[in-house]
Amino acid sequence: MMRSHFSITLMNCKTAVSVKPFVRMKSVLPISWERPEKLPPHHPSKSGDLKKRADIDLTRFPHLFSESEELKTADENVKRIFSLRFQKQRVANQILKHDLADKVRSHKLDYTSREVKIALLTGAIRNLTQYVEPLRRKQVPGPIRTNMKEMIDMRKKHLRLLRQADYKLFEWILDELDLEFKPKPLVLERVERKQSMRKLTDQYCENVRNDRLAELRAEFEAKQIPFLEEKLAKLQWIRENESKYELPETVTEEDIENARKRLEELKLKRNENEKQLESSN
Amino acid sequence: MAIARSSMLLGKCFPCVKKNASKIVVKRMVLDKNLLMYFDEEETYFAHDPNKICKTNDIVLIEELPQKLTKLITHRVMEVVFPHGDVTDPITGKKVIRTKYRDELEETAELYGKTDRGYDYESAPPRGWQEDKKDFSHLETYHRYSADDKNPNAVDK
């Protein structure tokens, strides 16, 4: 294979040579683009969780003994030892999870309905979020990271299916558990500089167009009242002169009345708009 | 293959940016003569709906207008046949949740011991009271492509 002189010199060259320097496309328009920050899955805008993990009362008993009659009538020291103060963190987490599930449970043994699944997942996600939030991404063990993301995705799926089955209950659950539901985008798109610049340019052009149209509209509207006043005066003058010099009639009383009506309506409308603007400010 | 046009169509509502209109997707089975198999073919219509009676994923009936309203709007929404998540069984006239009646589920709950959760089908407000508050299912979302983008339709990737 024949090699060009240029490539041979490049190959012989000991230091790296950049043949085509990278040039970033710059827009002439006042548009700047920044890549959106990559957010962790537990971020409220991504997970849809509007509330954080609730604080727990440390005098409570574990979930297993919560209904025990013996413990309720037991000695103070026994109660103290059984309380959450001397239990592991995961026991408190479990209680928080079941508190949320109790809120939405329809009957005592309801552990498998969709709303209870959502509540249990929400509890688990909130517990994990509290642990993960202060850490950097790499400080969190991999399995926990994946587990959490899977749980968030699963909750989204359950919410979507609950909406499909029972819309009223879905809305009540959103309100009760403080969750937000946004559907997935129908089209999957990569975030790219060039494509984004194009979209931003389109947006900018549309804004310019709308601004100019609004300006033109305001300009015409400002001329409307003086024009109608002038028209009314002229019509009246024509009618007077026609009757004075006994010329054939071209302007009737109706025309004058119509013009006056239109002027009054316009003035009324403007006044109302001004009042609305003042009240909104 | 071209789809034969008819004046009334049954379709599914999709999120739409346009005001006074709803986006309806009509699905039909079209025969492929080479494979002798039926395949889905979808067609999108924009139907005039000033009161926004249909929500995303509702099954609605639309009718062709005698004259086009705009370049896009060619139909009008006649009625919502199956509201999404609030379906009535046409034979018995009872409300349905997936494969079960609501009464059945409430009976089961009573047998197991009903809890006093603050939710009841009769006293619950009509669907749509959480719209724009916590339920954004009516929005046509997209992936956020710019850091300055504050549009509620944008979803973080």
Image (cartoon, coloured by chain):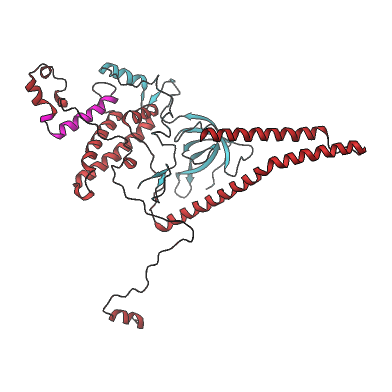
The secondary structure that dominates the magenta segment is: helix
Q: Which chain is cyan?
A: B
Q: Position of residue B144 (x, y in %)?
A: 39, 48
Q: Is residue A126 above or below residue A68?
A: below
Picture quadrant where residue B115 is located: top left
Residue range of the region highlighted in magenta in the rendering: A85-106
Query: Which residue corresponds to the image point at 29% horizontal and 32% vertical from the top-left?
Result: A118
Q: Is A266 positioned to the left or the right of A111 in the image?
A: right
Quarter of the image where the N terminus of chain A is located: bottom left
Q: Is A176 positioned to the left or the right of A249 in the image?
A: left
Residue B12 seen in this snapshot: yes
Which color was chain A given?
Answer: red
Q: Residue A102 colored magenta?
A: yes
Residue B49 seen in this snapshot: no
Query: Which residue corresponds to the image point at 46% horizontal and 39% vertical from the top-left?
Result: B15
Q: Position of residue A271 (x, y in %)?
A: 62, 34
Query: Which residue corresponds to the image point at 21% horizontal and 46% vertical from the top-left?
Result: A135
Front residue of A132 and A57? A57
Picture quadrant where residue B130 is located: top left
**Residue that lies at the very extreme toward the right in this rendered image:** A246
Q: Position of residue B75 (x, y in %)?
A: 57, 37
Q: Position of residue A263 (x, y in %)?
A: 71, 35
Q: Residue A93 colored magenta?
A: yes
Q: Is A91 positioned to the left or the right of B77 in the image?
A: left
